[in-house]
Amino acid sequence: MKTKINKSVLKQILKPLMVFALIFNLSSCVEQTDSTSATVNSSEDTGETITSAIDLTGKKIGYCSPSLNAPYYQALLQSIKATTEKNGMIFLSADGQNDINKQVAAVEDLITKGVDALLLNPKDPDALVGVTRMAKAAGIPVFIIDSSINPSADFVTTVQSNNLANGELAGEWLVKKMGNTTMNIALLSGNAGNPVGKTRKQGLLQGITEEQLRTQGKIDLNIKTQAYTEWSYAGGLKAMEDILVAHPDINVVITESDVCVLGAIKAIAQAGKTDDILIVAGADGQKEAIKYIMDTDFYGCTAMNSPVQIGKNAVQYAIEYINGKRDFPKTSFTAPLLITKENAAKYYNPKALF
C-alpha cells in the first residue's frame, strides 16, 4: 500500500537525511580528488606509463583481491598488473578465494614478500584492519581499492568510483523518465551490510527523492520490497522470480550493481514483463548491461564503475607515494558517469573482460 506523507512527517524523515547528505558532501569536498574520466574497459589492457622521478625497476606492487570468480575482479587485476609492469615494476598477486581467512593469510604472505606498496580490495570492512597495521609496521603503504575498510585501519587512501554520485545520477534519470507515472519499485541489493552497496543505495534514493522534490514538489517513494542477490547472476534470478510472484505490480527495478539484475532479466522475460518493467542500475557499466541499454528499452541506465580506471589510478597513487608524496585524501574517486542509450555505444566494448 502506498503511503501519503504529510509535510510534518516529511520534514521528520528528511531532516536526518539532509544532515547526513551535508556531512557527506562536506567530507567529499575534503577527500575527493580530481581524476581522469572513466576509461572504457579493455580486453587488451597494456597499462599506462606514469611519470616517476626515481627508477622503479625492481619495485614490487602487491595486490590482493577478495576473489577472482567474477569478470570485474579479473579486469581489475589485469589493469593493476598491466600498469605495474608497464612501469618496470614487479607484480605480485594473491586471491582471497571468497574466504576472509584466506584473504587475511594472502595479505600476510604479500607483506612477508616485502612489497613496496600493497593494494587491497577487502572482502570485509573490519576483518582486514589488523593486516593493514601489520603492513604499516613493516613500512608498507596500503591502498584500499574498489571497496571500503573500517576507518581505524592504517591506509593511505581509498580508490573507488563515486558510488554516491553515480547512484544520484541514476535516480535522477529514473524520475525524469517516469515523470508522474506511479512507480512500484523493487530494490535488488548485493548483500546485507556491504558498505559499497549501502552507499550506492543511498545515492539512488537521494537521486530519486531530490528530483521528485525539484520537479514535482513531493516525494512518492514506493519501494515494495528489497531482495539480496549476493552479487550474482543466480541470486538475481531467484530474487526476481520471488518478487514477481509476491509483487506482480512491480514496474521499476533499481539495483546496486549490474550483476544483481542481469540474472533478474531472465525472470522478467520468462514472465513476459520486459515491456512493463524499467531497470535502473547505480553501477557498474558491465558490458552485458551496456548491450541491453543499447538494444532494449527495459534497461534504462547504469553508472560507470571502471575496474580499468580504478586499477590505473591505484598504481599511479602507489608510484606517487614511492616518490615521496604523502598528502593524499582519504578517498580518491574516479569521475561519476551515467550510461544511457544516448552514449552507451561510446562505452561498449564486446571484447572487454568486464
Image (cartoon, grey):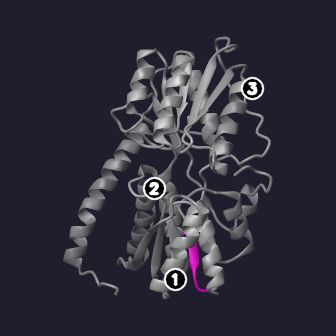
Q: Which residue is mark 1?
A: 244
Nearer to us: label 1 or label 3: 1
What's the distance in space between the residues labelled 1 and 2, CA to CA?
23 Å
SS of the residue at dot 2? helix
- Using a 10 Å C-alpha cutoff, classify the residue at mark 3 as few (fewer than 14 neighbours), some (14 to 19) or many (20 or more): some
Q: Which residue is mark 2?
A: 197
Q: Position of residue 329 (x, y in %)?
A: 44, 32
Nearer to us: label 3 or label 2: 2
Is there CB contact under 8 Å for labels 1 and 3?
Answer: no
Q: From the viewer's side, name the closer residue of 208 and 257.
A: 257
Q: Is residue 259 left or right of residue 245?
A: right
- Magenta residue check for 220: no
Magenta stretch: dominant secondary structure = strand
What's the distance in space between the residues labelled 1 and 3, CA to CA?
49 Å
Residue 197 vertical position relative to residue 47 in the rendered view, above or below: below
Is there CB contact under 8 Å for labels 3 and 2?
Answer: no
- Which of disc 2 and disc 3 is earlier in sequence? 3
What's the distance in space between the residues labelled 3 and 2, CA to CA?
33 Å
> Which amino acid does the dot numbered 3 rest on?
Lys
Q: Which residue is mark 3?
A: 86
